[in-house]
Image (cartoon, grey):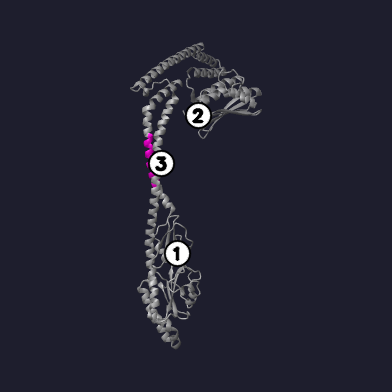
Amino acid sequence: MRKNSHSIRLKIVIWAVGLSLVLALFIATTSYILSMRYLKENQHQSALTNIHVLGNNIDSNINTVMTFSNWICLDSTINNYVQSVAETYTEDKILGRKLSMMTWNHLNNEFNIVGVRNYVDRVVISTIDGKNFLQDIAGGGASSSSNTPQMIMASSFYEPLISSPSFSWYGICKNPMSKSGNPPIIPIIRAIYKADSSEVLGWVYMDIPVSVIIDSLKSFVFENDDALYLTFTEGVSYRYDGRSFVKDSLPTGLVTYTLPETGWKLSYLPSESALKARMKLYLALIILIFTVILFAGIILSLSLHRIITKPVSKLIDRLDQIGLGDFSRDPSIEWPNELGEIGIGINSLSQNVSDLMEKRILDEKTKHDLEYQVLQSQINPHFLYNTLNTIKWMATIQGSEGIADMSTALSRLMKNIAKGTESVISLKDEFALLDDYFTIMKYRYGGTIELGYETEDEALLQCKINRFSLQPIIENSIFHGIEPKGSAGKIVVHTYKNDDKLFIDVTDNGVGMTKETIDDVLSGKARSSNEFFRQIGVSNVNERIKYTFGEEYGMHITSEVGSFTTTTLILPLKYM
């Protein structure tokens, strides 16, 4: 019956949830594919727009430099200088200097007017042999030398660039004017031709600091795994690492834009992590849609379950609970329908069984109470300690102090037994009970035994302990330790705490116990001394501690034969 109801419910859940799951998976998969395609296209378009703006800015700056270099190559004053300076210096040095100064002023004026100083550190115009040259340095920060043309002509880029019929780019090179090669530059070298022929009269050199390109890239925001590449000619590509350009080959998946004026190529590798981060947002939305659809299916299955199978399942579960001993009334199965009438009948049955059991328990309790009263009436402790008080006063009058002390101690013990109902008392009160018991034992053994206390903190005297826990241990120390010794003995009760636990060590200097004797004492098999509480032994103390405070507490005994025995009580650090 229970199996059939569960199978019906399972079929309902499978159909409802399964249909919702298939629908949710289809929508989620379609949304994920379309979202991924849209994000990739959007990222590609965004990257292309960014490098368009960045590339046009760089292209505009470099185009200014290229225009200035074209002007130098076509200017008649500069053409006249490179063509006649050598001959003029030979004929008249003063005229040669005037020619050089006039041409340099002409160059410097144009250098300042067109604004090339912002992009070029050095302009050198030289005759083809490098013996006569003009030089203009932006801001005067760069170093100058008399053999500047020779240093340029000795560089690796001179021959490829001077021999090129048009603009050509060699890439990022070491600065020929610096021993260290820093700062790196992008060199420009153009041949200056004779006005009416193809004869090369000289050349112009300009160096573009790489910092000009880097400054343009500062506004570009880089992710951890994206990359920007700059390509001058085929096979000469550099990767920007955030601070400088490093020569590197081009990977796949680049978005590339060719600068229209310079012909440089600016390539950008989109960030995979940025794409994944955006995809996570879309994925979260897709998961939300998936969850909503799935949740709707679960709600549908739960509704069907509540309407069809839940009432029958609750009735069966209620019968199972009654079988396990729960006879309480359950109003939730008393529905206003036919199944509710069955539920009312089940509740009435369980109530009748519960009433019958409670009556049986009450009868048993009454029986035990009567038996306990009969036991109490057999020996009335009040009569005993009143009689002992009378003996005490008679012994005091007659000067028998020992009898008086023993009578007083025994009287207090009997009084505590008669009036004490608490199972847990303070350690201070337990010590008082122990003192009364030991007073009797001390006189019995003729004063050959001693009891001492070592308490590390007086506040520990307010900790909780089971009533009559220490007396059986002291009795065990006397009976198993000191009495067989045949001489005087001493028992020390050491109280201390460690973390959240209270420790009480009861140590005697008796004959000690073997491991077998310790096991017998803890298990209750050891022979009783039959002196005080006949049924309260060491094993009883251990069991009461565990029952009251938990299994992690209790006691253990360590001993060395012929030397000592220590019984340790472990209790929680709980104050009254």
Q: Position of residue 250 (x, y in %)?
A: 47, 60
Question: Secondary structure under badge 1?
Answer: strand
Q: Position of residue 161 (x, y in %)?
A: 46, 73
Q: Residues within 10 Å of mark 3 (few under 14, many from 20)?
A: some
Read off the residue under disc 2. 461
Distance of label 3 from label 1 (alpha carbons): 46 Å
For the question of whether residue 565 can be seen, the reply is yes
Question: Secondary structure under badge 3?
Answer: helix
Where 437 falls versus 371 (above or below)?
below
In magenta stretch: residue 67 = no
The foreground one among 209 and 154 is 154
Where 247 falls versus 122 (above or below)?
above
Distance of label 3 from label 2 (alpha carbons): 69 Å
Q: Position of residue 488 (x, y in %)?
A: 64, 25
- At label 3, the amino acid type is Leu
- State which mark lies toward you, 2 or 1: 1
Q: Residues within 10 Å of mark 2 (few under 14, many from 20)?
A: some
Read off the residue under disc 3. 25
Please identify the dominant SS of the magenta region. Answer: helix
Q: Which residues are magenta?
A: 281-298
Q: Quadrant of the N terminus?
A: top left
Read off the residue under disc 1. 231
For the question of whether residue 567 can be seen, the reply is no
Residue at horizontal 42 percent and vertical 52 percent from the top = 274
- At label 1, the amino acid type is Thr
Distance of label 2 from label 1 (alpha carbons): 88 Å
Q: Quadrant of residue 529?
A: top right
- State which mark lies toward you, 3 or 1: 3
- At label 2, the amino acid type is Leu
The foreground one among 202 and 35 is 35
